[in-house]
Amino acid sequence: MPFFSRISPIARTVVIALSLLLPQRGSFAEDGPEGITRPVVLPPFDPNAPGCSKPKSVNKVLAFAQDNQRKFMQGVARGLELAAKDRGLQYQLAQADNDAKKMNTQIQAFLDSKVGALVVAPVDTSSVNRVLKAAIWSGAYVGTVVPPPAISLLNAPQYLTGKVLGDEAAAYIRTRLNGKAHVVLLTHDSLQFVAPRFVAMRDSLKTIPGVTIVADISPLTVDEAGGAAMMRTILLADPDIDVVLGADTVVLGALAALREAGKARPDQFLGGIDGEPAAVAEIKAGGPYKASVSLSSPIFSYAMGQHAADWLEGKSIPQAMDILPIALTLENIAKYEADITDPASVYRDPARRAIYLKMYGNICFDSRDNYINFPWSSEKK
């Protein structure tokens, strides 16, 4: 008689209950630690912190899972590729084209091929959460652009970023539009981590009684096509728009729609976030596009690539990094363009690097259980 059939009903119940509590093979949620899940304030990064072991059983490959092909993300890809070349890492790129399922499959393929370093700009945070944790458990460096989980997470002080742009727009409305403006906010509500930037824009604008926000809405896709499609719809209801704010890529699309409809004017204020090349070109041309808050994607991604290489060498790296917002003007665009063309020289110069980046916390391979698994922001105290 088999052993299980000979034990008492009570004992059998205990055995079954215990079996349900044991880790199940292949279950992502029970394969490794959950990291730091409660918000903490990270201290400044210590570049002299001791290192630890080198990761084993991973390859010297830096891979980038890219959400879409907007220019900001192309800048991220360029900085990572430059860093990989400088540090002797193979570089691989996967384009998800705004397809969350496709991205999940691509990241799983990177994991299966044992890449040693992975940077991700997620299409949808929830869909890649488990596979990113699996990559962390494998010993790989995992860096993300904004959302967790990550060994090293990149963010911007989102409220400050939005405030820089909102204040520029508010000042323009007061001084150039006589305190009156019809405003469009093209938001990004599908990514909760950037929501504070739009809160800040609203806070800046509400100080002006003559401002009317005629649309406060997210385009279906965060790219030029999405911005253009949304602006065409808005123009049907209100053809006289004075101010448009959002990410550069959607505001550039909105500008195209305004021009298409014959509604673009030199006295308008269009402003965006990201410092995309096309936005910089529009500012230099002196038309409706008046400002872009740069987040310097080639510079921060070059730093992420350097941290990935340091991780593979067993060094201590930052747990998080701020991209510091800079409002681009005709006075500082030339210097900015020189810096993003050569991010390696910026990274090597601590004073120049500090203009763009601020680093927090320390982590290395042996302490990887302390990865960030909460929506980190330096603005949360």
Image: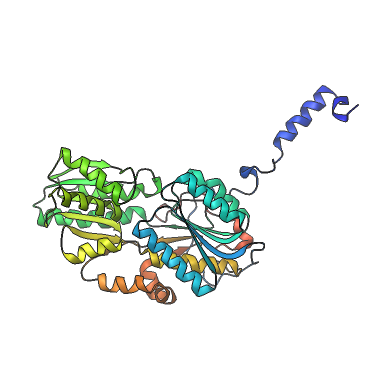
Give me the residue at 80% from left, 27% from top: 12
Left or right of 93 on screen, residue 156:
left
Task: Judge by depth and name the residue closer to the eye, 109 or 172.
Answer: 109
**In this rendering, does residue 358 appear at all?**
no
In the rendered image, residue 22, in percent from the top left (x then y), is placed at 72, 39
Location of residue 31 in the rendering, given as x and y in whole percent from the top left corner: 65, 47
The residue closer to the viewer here, 361 or 138, is: 138
Q: Is residue 148 above or below residue 336?
A: above
> Which quarter of the figure has residue 24?
top right
Q: Is residue 167 left or right of residue 97?
A: left
Residue at 29% from the left image edge and 60% from the top image edge: 293
Q: Quadrant of the N terminus?
A: top right
Q: On the picture, is 138 further left or further right than 381? A: right
Say whether residue 69 is left or right of residue 117: left
Compared with 173, 233 (above or below) is above
The location of residue 88, given as percent across then percent down, is 54, 73
